[in-house]
């Protein structure tokens, strides 16, 4: 089995009197896709925010490559190779695909006295194309504004951007939301590509067929606790729904 790359260990998080997470833990290995599911309010987003450095845990810790880390900001987790894609993809509609891939990480050509940098559009376009190809995303018309693309293509670009930069882990919060069936299938294929490259993927979705199709293992949260953590093959659509809702029988 591949080595564990990231782990949440005994993570608790309280907001005032609200306990969002209590003693939550799971591990993710290189090349593994883990589904994180649970009803609204189960604590999924809070756990993602702790894994990606947005929040600090109240108790417990996160370990990257077996070393306990404390992220003081999302930038620190990013620097460590952890990419997070939130529901709202954060792409700029007016910019091209390659400009979006490099948003906030632009390649500068050294300017006069090495001070005033100029954007190196050519280098960015080439590398963005490479990154997206690695993600299995066709980049015909890479210079056209992202705003002219379909929702599925935009989501693919957002994931492609994450794959371009991720060195360890990609966290995808509801990436197939609001997508048509074919577009969602494309996104699931991109997830499979990330896995082939040895990245860990955390996939959050309410669409259980997608979770059952795309993941190797499923972690179920309920009221801030991990109540199931098992290989995807051990669930049926019915049994997974019952674990999530806590409703046995019927
Ligand atoms: N910033 C916050 N302040 C107060 N309560 C919060 C905050 N973020 C989340 N919560 C609470 O924590 C619990 C878990 O929320 P969340 O992690 O968003 O669940 P999920 O993503 O599974 O729907 C909920 O009861 C929610 O109201
Ligand atoms: Mg949420």
Image (cartoon, helix red, strand yellow):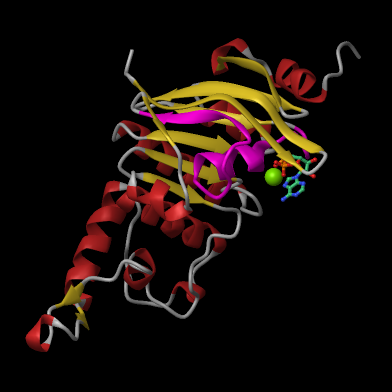
On the picture, is 13 further left or further right than 7?
A: right
Residue 179, horizontal then vertical, whole percent = 61, 53
Q: Which residue is outermost to the bottom?
A: 112
**In-front residue for pair 60/181:** 60
Q: Residue at x 49, y 40 (%)?
A: 188
On the picture, is 123 further left or further right than 101?
A: left
**In-front residue for pair 34/116:** 116
**Magenta includes 75?**
no
Q: Residue at x 54, y 37 (%)?
A: 203
Q: Quadrant of residue 16?
A: top right
Q: Residue at x 24, y 69 (%)?
A: 125
Residue 84, horizontal then vertical, whole percent = 48, 48
Vertical position of residue 167 compared to residue 139: above or below: above
Q: Residue at x 13, y 85 (%)?
A: 111
Quarter of the rendering occupied by the N terminus: top left
Vertical position of residue 197 compared to residue 235: above or below: below
Q: Quadrant of residue 38?
A: top right
**Magenta includes 47?**
yes
Range of magenta residues: 39-64
Q: Quadrant of residue 242?
A: top right
User: Is residue 29 at least partly visible in the picture?
Assistant: yes
Q: Which residue is outermost to the right?
A: 250
**In-front residue for pair 17/113:** 17
Number of on-image labels = 0
**In-front residue for pair 170/208:** 170
Residue 88, horizontal then vertical, whole percent = 59, 60
């Amino acid at each position: 089995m591949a080595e564990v790359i990231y782990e949440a260990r005994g993570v608790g998080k309280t907001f005032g009197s609200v306990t969002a997470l209590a003693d939550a833990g799971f591990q993710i290995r290189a090349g593994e896709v883990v589904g994180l599911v649970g009803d609204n309010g189960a604590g999924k987003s809070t756990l993602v925010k702790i894994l990606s450095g947005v929040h600090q845990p109240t108790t417990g810790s996160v370990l990257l490559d077996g070393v306990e880390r404390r992220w003081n900001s999302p930038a620190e987790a990013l620097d460590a190779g952890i990419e997070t894609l939130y529901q709202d993809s954060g792409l700029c509609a007016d910019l091209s695909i390659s400009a979006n891939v490099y948003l906030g990480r632009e390649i500068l050509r050294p300017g006069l006295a090495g001070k005033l940098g100029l954007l190196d559009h050519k280098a960015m376009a080439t590398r963005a194309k490479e990154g997206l190809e690695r993600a299995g995303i066709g980049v015909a018309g890479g210079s056209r504004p992202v705003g002219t693309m379909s929702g599925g293509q935009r989501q693919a670009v957002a994931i492609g951007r994450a794959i371009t930069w991720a060195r360890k882990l990609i966290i995808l919060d509801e990436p197939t939301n609001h997508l048509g069936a074919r577009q969602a299938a494309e996104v699931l294929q991109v997830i499979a590509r990330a896995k082939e490259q040895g990245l860990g993927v955390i996939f959050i979705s309410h669409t259980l067929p997608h979770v059952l199709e795309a993941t190797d293992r499923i972690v179920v949260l309920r009221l801030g606790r991990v109540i199931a953590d098992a290989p995807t093959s051990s669930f049926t659509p019915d049994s997974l729904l019952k674990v999530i809702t806590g409703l046995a029988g019927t």
